[in-house]
Each structure stands twice: as structure tokens, then as C-alpha cells.
Image: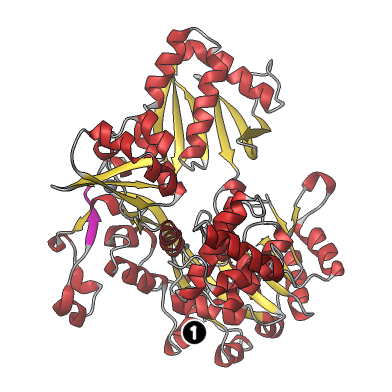
Amino acid sequence: MDINNQNLKNILVQRGYISSEDLKKVEKFAKSRNISILDYLIEKKIIKEYLAGEIVVEDILLRKKYVTSDDIKQAEKFSSVNNISIIECLLIKGLINNNILGEAIAEWFGVAYFDLSSNPVVAEQVLRIPEYMAKKYRAIFLKEDNKNIFITTDIPKDLKSHISVFEKFFESKKNIKLFYSLSEDIDKSFKNYNRSLKARFIEIINSGRGIAPEIIEEIFNDALEYLSSDIHFEPQEHEVIVRFRIDGILQEVGRFAKKYYENVLNRIKVQAYLRTDEHFSAQDGAIRYIKNNVTINMRVSILPTLDGEKIAIRILSENIRSFSLSDIGLSTDHQAIISEASKKPFGMIVVTGPTGSGKTTTAYSILKVLNNSGVNITTIEDPVEYKIPGINQVQVNPVTNLTFAKGLQSIVRQDPNIILVGEIRDEDTAQIAIGAALTGHLLLSTFHSNDAATAIPRFIDMGISPFLLASTLELIISQRLVQKICDNCKMKDDLKSYNINKFFTDEYLEKQMVLYKGAGCKSCNNTGYKGRTALFEFLHITPEVHDLILKNPSAKQIWDLAKTQGAKSLFQDGLEKVKDGITTLEELLRVASPIHTQNIYDKK
Ligand SMILES: [Zn+2]
């Protein structure tokens, strides 16, 4: 690529890295030494290397039309307010995804991009390069053919200058072909070098050093690395089982002899400011764990059982990477409805679903899209689960009488543009929320109901007048989480095991009846599933639905009308995801039924 192109120069001058007069001089110097302007600026310490990288990537994204200059302007504003990079902003706002970013960075390095996330490597591949060498050069072995050995890295420049190390190591005449992959995916692949926690426990115990601190450190580090949401220590008669909850599923990761448990338990109690001399009552505390300069908040609860005190630790996910609307499983149609509904300066968007259906994540993702420097956003939550830069987050605290209703009242007085209420649980909160939405605030909240249409009679049952409800509601989203098929072992499924005709139209059957499942592999712990995504149901409050709400309708009447206007049920959204090979029919049937059930409210 032409690293000296005009667009790049414009960015350098516009952002104030260099004046246009100096740029002309620099161009001359760089040309005389046959290096690029950026390399010259880096060498003279006028610009830091990572910033130069960002500028190049930005330029590539613009030239390849992945983003518009408006997108960049929007990201620039957001970035200066929140003090994060422009590229990070583009990702958070869903304007680019990881693969587009990967392609752009690869182009900068002059190599091809390899998407390790969709094409994960197995241990046998990774172990072809010894750990010390792989980690030093950030290299992952991909494959080899008659002529070439294919290796991917996130530092192609460094690796290129040390290619002889690899040639020597492989002792072959083959060419070494380099690819670029994203750092987070390279890190994930490195996990193949990890020995099991169980093996490390044995090593720690045999070493005779401070056993408890080392065991705890290994466990915390692993839990964070695997993005676990919970850590459990379960004392049995002779052993203690350690489990992590990953993607919502609790799985054993190791065990150690019970005689070491007292020290482990005491140490955790001390860190969480709990009483070490109390063994017979439940205790709750918190740990702030600092790793690589990042503080991770953990909630600790201890429960006495017959075999000893059980520890459950919840890792608050504020440190986990942010989601964009497409990452959480929203189709482009659904994303368009959200952006339309949230453009209005006032009104209410409600996300519903049972506990554990991912509704908080969806509410946050919408908030992130709305988080521009020009708007003031305040939240009231119980607890604050993710911290978002640039947003004022208030935590409910019953001790100081800061309830949802009280907190929301004070927030409204401060007149922000957008308010997130963690959950509407009672009439007081519902009334204040509706009042806020009526008086020029965009209000976002979660609400407990089984499907989108049911939320309306539930609000009316809570004492909200149909008139106020109809005037404020913009959109109701209902959702469920399903497990995703593991990409590493995805295969075609045997259709005979399903009663297919029940779910698919004949047309689809005739055309291309292919379903998928995971065969089970190391990458998914032999479950065939890896990661989760959400199924959605949207109830858009159209003028017709608005008029119907005034008549105090049943959920069924509302949904029947919405269907005639094109609304799709959770199950229909799920079927699309089954057809696309994202999840299985089995998973879909676990969380949603083909028949829309709203019988509870169908009393009229
Ligand atoms: Zn698998």
C-alpha cells in the first residue's frame, strides 16, 4: 500500500501531530532515506508507534469504505470524551467488527489476515512450536504443505526480522508464510499450552511453598482467562471441587485435598473482609483483585454446608469486552428498529425476559450506541454490572434507602437526556419511569415478563394507565439465551431424529434442508456448544398498537395485531438461527415453544 498517501497526511495535520509546513520537510527527509513518513515520525519520536498504527488502520478503513468520514468524526468525539482510542470506539459502536479490523491491520503489515476466532487451531497445531518460542514471537502454527509452513502472529514485523529462527527450528527448505491474527485470538490459542489446574495444584502442593496463595492465584487467573462469571469451591468429605461457570454452564476445573482448604478459605475470607472465626452462618463480602493494572470486582458469598463452608464468587463483568448490537445476535432489521426507536428524544424502550436471559446486556448494548458526547446518560442499577466510560452510574443501596424509586426521582430532577433503570420491579418505579419518559427523557429498562406482548397487560395490572403507557412506550424487546454450536466441530445433523414438518414450511424442506450440530471437541469440552447468543422478539409500538393499548387489550390481541404488521416471535427468530447453523433445534426447543403461549393473560 502507499503509506505516503494524501489522506494519511491530512489526518496527521488535522489531528495536530505536525504542521503542514513541517510535513513538507519531513516528506523530503523521509524520501531521501527511502522510508515512509510515518516511520520517520516514529523514529524522531514525533508520534508514538501505536498511534501511527491507528492512523494507518483508520485510513485503510476509510479507503476500503468500511467506515465513512462521519463515522470517524463521531468516533473522534466519543474517543476524546472517554479517553479511549478511535478504533476502540468504532468497535464499541458496532461500526466495524473484529474481522474488518483484522483485515485492515493485516493490510498495514502487508500480510493476509487469518480469522482465528472462527477457525480456531487445535492443540496439536499449537504445540508444533514450543511455548517459549511461540510466546516470544507471538506465533501460532497453522498448517504446512509441500512448499510452505503457515504461521500466524500479531507482530508480523518482528517475526519477519526473526524468520531465520523459525527456519532453523523447522529444519526444512520450506518457505515460512506469515499471516496476521488479532492479539486476543492469539492469546486464546496460547491456552493450548496451559496444563490443567489439577496438574498445577499437585505441583504447588509438592513444592511446599505457600500453598493457599498460589492455589488461589492460579484459580483467579484461570477464571479470568476463561471469562468465567463464577468460581465455586465445593467442599466434599475428602476433597474440594473447584468449578467455573463459563457461558452459563458450571463445570469442574480441578480439585485438591481437603486438608489445604482451611488455609484457602481463611485467605479468601481475609481478602473479602469476612470473619475467619465464624463457621456456622452465611457471610457476604467483596474482593478487589488487581491483575495487569486492571481492578476486577468479585462478590464473595460463603455458605456453611455439612462438609464445610462453600465459597461462591461472582466475577462482576465490567472488565469483559463490550458487545455491539450485532455481537449479541440482533439481525440488521432489529438493529434498524432499535436505532429508529432510540432516535426519539423521549419515550420508553423495555427489554423483557426471565432471569438469566441476557436482558441487561442488551440494555447496555443499546446504551453504548446512544453514548455520544453530546448526551447526558444516567443509570440506576442493582448492582452496576458493567462500567461504561462517559456514563453516570448509580447503584441501588437499601442501607441508605437509595431504592430504584428514590434514586430515579433524584435522577429525573437532574434532567439527563437518557436514563437506564436496571429493572422496573414495583409500581412506584413504574410510575416515576413513565413520568420521566413523558417529560422529555429517553428511558431504557428491563422488566420481568415471558414475552413482549405480555409486558403491556402486566404494566396495566401494576396500575399504569393505558393512556400513559401508550403515550410513552416505543418498543418492547423480549429475549432468551441459547448456546451456540461450536465452530470448531460443527457438522451436518441427522434430520431423521426431528419431527421436521412441524417447524419448517415445505418450501424450505424441498430447497435445502440442512441442520447442524457440534460433534464435540477439545475446544468445547466435548459439549458441541461454545458461547451463547440471544433470540429476540420485537413489539414495535406502531400507531395501530398504540390505539389498541388504549382499549386495555389482552396479550394475545396485541400479538395478533403485531403479527399482521410483520412481528416475528422468539421461536421464529430462533428458527432463522437454526437454519443459519448458529444453534440447534434442540437448544431452540429448550427455551422457546412453537406455539405462542400467553394464556395467563388471555382472560378476556
Ligand atoms: Zn467443539
Measured along the vertical axis of the image, is residue 127 above or below residue 177? above
Seen from the viewer's position, the closer of residues 450 and 349 is 349
Q: Residue at x 65, y 84 (%)?
A: 470
Measured along the vertical axis of the image, is residue 476 above or below residue 33? below
Asked if residue 519 is among those painted magenta in the image, a careful observer would answer yes
Residue 45 in the image: state x and y as whole percent: 65, 50
Q: Residue at x 32, y 70 (%)?
A: 575
Q: Which residue is mark 1?
A: 557
Q: Amino acid at mark 1?
A: Gln
Residue 483 in the image: state x and y as whole percent: 37, 54
| Mark 1, other Cα within 10 Å: few <14 / some 14–19 / many ≥20 | some
Seen from the viewer's position, the closer of residues 111 and 27 is 27
> Quarter of the image holding residue 594?
bottom left
Label tally: 1
Seen from the viewer's position, the closer of residues 114 and 192 is 114
- Span highlighted in magenta in the image: 516-520
Indicate the secondary structure of the residue bearing disc 1.
Answer: helix
Residue 521 in the image: state x and y as whole percent: 25, 43
> Quarter of the image holding residue 576?
bottom left
On the picture, is 417 further left or further right than 592?
A: right
